[in-house]
Image (cartoon, rainbow, N blue to C red):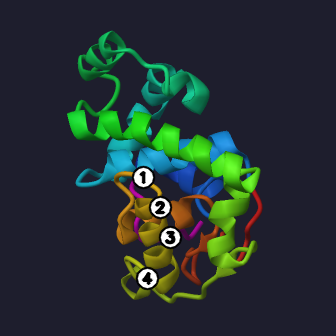
Amino acid sequence: MNRCDWVGVSPLERRYHDQEWGVPIYDDRKLFEALTLEGAQAGLSWVTILRKREGYRIAFDNFEAKKIVQYSPEKMEELMANTEIVRNKLKIHSVVTNAKCFIKVQKEFGHFSDYIWSFVEGKPTINKWKSAVEIPSSTSESEKMSKDLKKRGFKFVGPTICYAFMQATGMVNDHIESCFRCGNTHR
């Protein structure tokens, strides 16, 4: 079975690619999870984050923003000692900051999904790349998203992180043409 060039040999990466990457997500909690994990990945390999994903779900109350915004200084210290997540102070603190911003966006737009999907006019962009080298690291849409998220106070949301988030959540389907998932936005 042909897969995208970036997929490694680990069953975890293959399963993620085959079942999740590029599949549209509209659930607010899952979108917040994806945004958090993409920010955590900055400077690291994606497989590292996949290995720690369950640890993140446990450590951050399954990405329930209303719980995260209430974290105490003691909880933050506990997170800094948690080997099941990336122990980077700025990244950990960004989750709380982003949870606060996320709730504000929900209040303004009704759903975070409505806001974030507006950057692609509410429907997935399906690209037709021949190889991974053609895939950009950012686009005008991810740059607009990044700029707006930053204006709203979000952290770890640069254009490259936003584009990876768009790919992960199916806002953009960047499976290469030879991949069995190319053009397929369903599981």
Q: Mark 1 near mark 3, Cβ–Cβ under 8 Å?
A: no
- Looking at the image, can residue 173 be seen? yes
157 left or right of 127? left
> Three-letter amino acid code at disc 4?
Ile
> Three-letter amino acid code at disc 1?
Phe
Residue 154, numbered label: 1
Tell me what residue is drawn at x 38 percent, y 71 percent. Answer: 159
Structural crowding at the residue carrying mark 2, measured as other residues with C-alpha within 10 Å and reported as few (<14), some (14–19) or many (≥20): many
Q: Main secondary structure of the magenta part?
A: loop
Q: Position of residue 41 (x, y in %)?
A: 33, 49
Quadrant of the image containing the C terminus: bottom right
Q: Mark 2 near mark 3, Cβ–Cβ under 8 Å?
A: yes
Q: CA distance from mark 1 to mark 3?
A: 11 Å
Structural crowding at the residue carrying mark 4, measured as other residues with C-alpha within 10 Å and reported as few (<14), some (14–19) or many (≥20): some
Q: Position of residue 183 (x, y in %)?
A: 70, 78
Q: Nearer the viewer, mark 3 or mark 4?
A: 3
Residue 149, numbered label: 2
Tell me what residue is drawn at x 40 percent, y 61 percent. Answer: 150
Comes first in the chain, label 2 or label 4: 4
